[in-house]
Image (cartoon, rainbow, N blue to C red):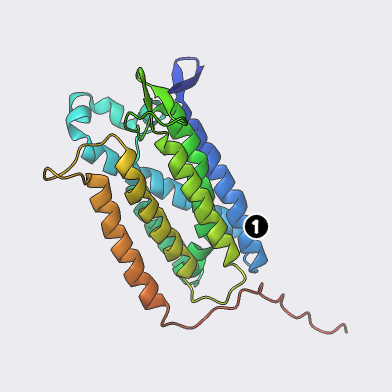
Amino acid sequence: MKPILVRLGPFPISSFGLFLLLAFLVGIVLARRRGARLGIDPSRMLDMALYMIIGGIVVGRLGYVVANWSVFAAAPGTIFTIWKDSGLTFYGALVGAMIVGALYARTLHMPLRTYLDIFAPALALGYAVAMVGALLHGLYIGRPTGVPWGVQMFLDRRHPTQVYLMLASLGTYAVLRSQEKAALAPGTLFYVWLLLHALSRVAVEFFVESPTVLNTMVTLAQVANAVVVVIAVIALALVARGPRMSPQPAAPPEMPPAA
C-alpha cells in the first residue's frame, strides 16, 4: 500500500487520485475514437467528456461528504481537499455525469442514450485503471484470507478485491466491445455495462471487509448495487422495445457538384 504516491511541495498526491486522473484520460481517448467512428465531432466528444467529469466529481464528492458527514463536520475545510483523500461515491459521480451529459446532449439535439453507449466501454476500461489506484491507496479492503494470491495489508494477507473488480471490469469491457458491431437499440450498451458492473460489485463485496446490515452477511454496498441491477434490467427491457440503431459510422455529407 502507498496511499500518498508523490508530493508536490505541500500538496500530497494520492495514488488513487493519480490513477483516477489516468482513468479519465483513458476514457476520454476511447470515447473520442468511438464517437469519431460514429460520425460525431471529436471536439464535441471532448467537451462533453470534460463537462461530465466535472459534474461527476462535484456530485460524487457531495455524496461522499454526506455519507461521511461526521468526519467532515469536525473539519469542514477538508470537504474541498479531494486531492488528499480522493473521496468520491461512484454512483454519485455517475449521476452527476449523466445530469451534465443530458444537458449538453440537449444543446446538440442528440439523444443522451446515444452518447451513453459511446461512453460505456470507456467507463469499463477507466474503472479497471482506477482499481490499480484503489489497490495502492487501500480502498475496498478485502477480508483476511489464506489463498495464494492474497496481498499483504495491515499485517494480514487479504483478498485483492481491487484486482477482482479490475478483472471483472476488463471482462465487461470485452463484452461491450464484442457487441459494438451489432444493431442495438440506443442505450443498450450503457445499461449492459451498468448491469455487469453492479453484478460484479455484488459478487466481490462478499470478499470486502465491510459492515453488514440487519445482522446478515449482506453489506450496504450489496444492497445498493442490487437496486442498480434491478434498474438496469428494467431499463434494458424498456430500450429493447425501441428501434435498432445501425452500428455503421454516419455517412459524410454530400458535397455540391463543382460549378
Which residue is situated farthest in the right direction here? 259
Check disc 1 and report the residue beneath it.
33
Could you tell me the amino acid type at mark 1?
Arg
Residue 138, image x, y percentages = 39, 28
Taking 68 as reference, is 258 above or below it? below
- Give me the residue at 27% from left, 46% from top: 221
- Between 171 and 96, the one nearer to me in the picture: 171
- Give me the residue at 62% from left, 50% from top: 29
Residue 209, image x, y percentages = 28, 34
- Give me the residue at 51% from left, 65% from top: 117
Total numbered badges shown on the rendered structure: 1
- Give me the residue at 45% from left, 59% from top: 193
In this rendering, position of residue 27 left or right of residue 154 = right
Taking 11 as reference, is 72 above or below it? below
Residue 89, image x, y percentages = 33, 43
Which residue is situated farthest in the left direction here? 214
Which quadrant of the rendered structure holds the N terminus?
Answer: top left
- Between 257 and 183, the one nearer to me in the picture: 183
Which quadrant of the rendered structure holds the C terminus?
Answer: bottom right
Is residue 207 at least partly visible in the picture?
yes
Is residue 49 at least partly visible in the picture?
no
- Between 76 and 1, the one nearer to me in the picture: 1
Residue 27, image x, y percentages = 55, 49
SS assignment at label 1: helix
Crowd around label 1: few <14 · some 14–19 · many ≥20 (10 Å): some
In this rendering, position of residue 115 left or right of residue 230 = right
